[in-house]
Image (cartoon, grey):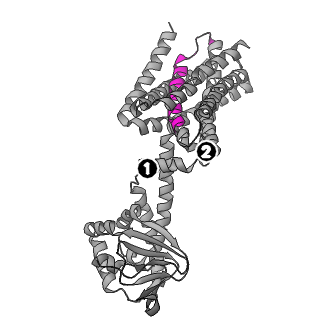
């Protein structure tokens, strides 16, 4: 009972920085560099504590008993813990838990943008103008291309309008009409893969015709400014554009069958080049993503995400209390300090995000306070589950569970803590702060031995 109460106290102490960090985040504006340094410092301290306190414990026990199976049980448990954390983390992120960290929000936006870009490449692969261009050049279009849908009968633009965009038909068909509605003349019907609006765009003249949707259509467009820049930079696009203007009414229907295979090869090549393309994520993108996820569902997802991060921490605290009692040594203050410092900036940034979503300060505070209590209870559970002197098959199970928690936490540090620190402060601060945190934990460990 004494060990369990001790674990409860240490768990609460390590997580009290959660409500404290939430208060700091709500009522002040700590600099990004300070937030980054604290998080990286905590990550370094946790890396030391996990290495020395848990994995070294397995090594010592294996060496003492000449039992290699202890090491294997720990390693297998660590691998399973990493996969389990990754699975649960992804599951919660898909429901909005990514909002708990700026780096995860950015990763989510980037993933969404790349998904849209791949769909756009699939659409652009059908455009006859672009099929003759090198895929690596067309990929540069992706950040500038916009998509839109029009219902049957809708007008895309009218004759005489100022020309500002070039259009590609992804799906459906349109008719090109010249003249007034009462005295109009049918010029052409364009379908999937065709381009329109290019003559007025390239010649810098008003629209020479009206384009109206025959069916429901999906179209891509690129603005005149971006298109002119691409023409200046790419001889291939310039030559193809000139040819397109000269041969606007050329019938290429017979070529469609032979272009199917070529389009597929082009699409695959463009996708490869897309992976090399740096897609920017702006501050505006971050703000829009936060505003999209408002209400109790997003707040609950954030809470569950932070709870997932804290579960392995709390279990390890309980294990460390048992190990300290078993070896008659002091509790690993390095690990407690690492968890404390890692939780502080995490709570600060997440509380700010929740406030921007409309959550009240009181709700935010009690949400983080509940996580503090849960961490203490988790440490108590960890201390009660793991006996001080396991024997036989139980011994391997215990070391496997220790490895499970350690693997989950190592994955969490690499997946969320260090990327978040890098997002706030950059590489230099993260590298040095992580090193200092690791060495500080080493110093605390050395002092505890004397």
Q: Which residue is at 53% across, 48% downward? A: 291
Q: Label 2, on which residue?
A: 298
Residue 247 drawn at (x, y percent): 33, 86
Q: Does the magenta stretch include residue 338?
A: yes
Of the numbered discs 1 and 2, the one sitting upstream in the chain is 1
The quadrant of the image that shows the N terminus is top right
**Which contiguous range is marked in magenta?**
327-352
Overall secondary structure of the magenta section: helix
Vertical comparison of 403 with 252: above or below: above
Q: Which residue is at 64% across, 43% downward? A: 296
Q: Does the magenta stretch include residue 159?
A: no
**C-alpha distance separating marks 1 and 2:** 19 Å
Q: Label 1, on which residue?
A: 284
Residue 267 drawn at (x, y percent): 45, 69
Vertical comparison of 107 with 182: above or below: above
Residue 330: which quarter of the image? top right
């Amino acid at each position: 009972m004494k060990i369990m109460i001790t674990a409860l106290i240490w768990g609460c102490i390590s997580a009290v920085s959660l409500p404290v960090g939430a208060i700091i985040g709500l009522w002040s504006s700590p600099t990004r560099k300070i937030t980054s340094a604290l998080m990286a410092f905590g990550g370094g301290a946790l890396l030391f504590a996990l290495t020395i306190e848990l994995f070294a414990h397995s090594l010592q026990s294996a060496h003492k008993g000449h039992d290699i199976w202890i090491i294997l049980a720990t390693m297998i448990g660590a691998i399973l813990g990493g996969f389990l954390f990754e699975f649960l983390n992804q599951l919660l992120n898909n429901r909005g838990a990514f909002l708990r960290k700026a780096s995860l929000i950015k990763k989510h936006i980037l993933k969404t943008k790349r998904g849209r870009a791949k769909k756009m490449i699939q659409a652009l692969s059908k455009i006859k103008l672009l099929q003759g261009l090198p895929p690596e050049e067309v990929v540069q279009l992706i950040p500038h291309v916009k998509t839109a849908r029009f219902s049957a009968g809708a007008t895309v633009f009218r004759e005489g309008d100022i020309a500002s965009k070039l259009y590609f038909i992804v799906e459906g068909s349109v008719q090109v009409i010249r003249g007034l509605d009462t005295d109009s003349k049918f010029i052409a019907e364009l379908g999937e893969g065709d381009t329109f609006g290019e003559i007025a765009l390239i010649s810098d003249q008003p629209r020479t015709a009206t384009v109206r949707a025959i069916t429901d259509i999906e179209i891509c467009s690129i603005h005149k400014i971006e298109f002119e820049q691409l023409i200046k930079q790419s001889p291939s696009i310039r030559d193809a554009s000139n040819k397109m203007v000269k041969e606007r009414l050329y019938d290429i229907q017979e070529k469609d069958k032979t272009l199917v295979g070529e389009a597929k090869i082009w699409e695959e090549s463009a996708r490869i080049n897309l992976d090399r393309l740096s897609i920017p994520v702006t501050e505006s993108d971050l703000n829009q993503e936060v505003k999209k996820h408002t209400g109790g569902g997003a707040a609950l997802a954030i809470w569950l995400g932070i709870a997932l991060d804290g579960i392995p921490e709390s279990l390890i605290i309980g294990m460390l209390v048992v190990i300290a009692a078993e070896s008659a040594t002091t509790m690993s203050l390095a690990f407690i300090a690492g968890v404390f410092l890692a939780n502080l900036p995490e709570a600060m940034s997440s509380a700010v995000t929740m406030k921007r979503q409309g959550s009240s300060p009181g709700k935010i505070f009690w949400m983080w306070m509940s996580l503090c209590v849960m961490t203490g209870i988790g440490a108590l559970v960890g201390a009660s589950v793991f006996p001080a002197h396991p024997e036989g098959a139980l011994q391997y199970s215990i070391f496997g569970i220790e490895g499970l928690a350690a693997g989950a936490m190592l994955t969490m540090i690499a997946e969320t803590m260090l990327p978040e620190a890098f997002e706030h402060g950059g590489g230099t601060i993260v590298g040095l702060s992580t090193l200092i945190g690791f060495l500080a934990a080493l110093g605390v460990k050395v002092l505890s031995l004397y």
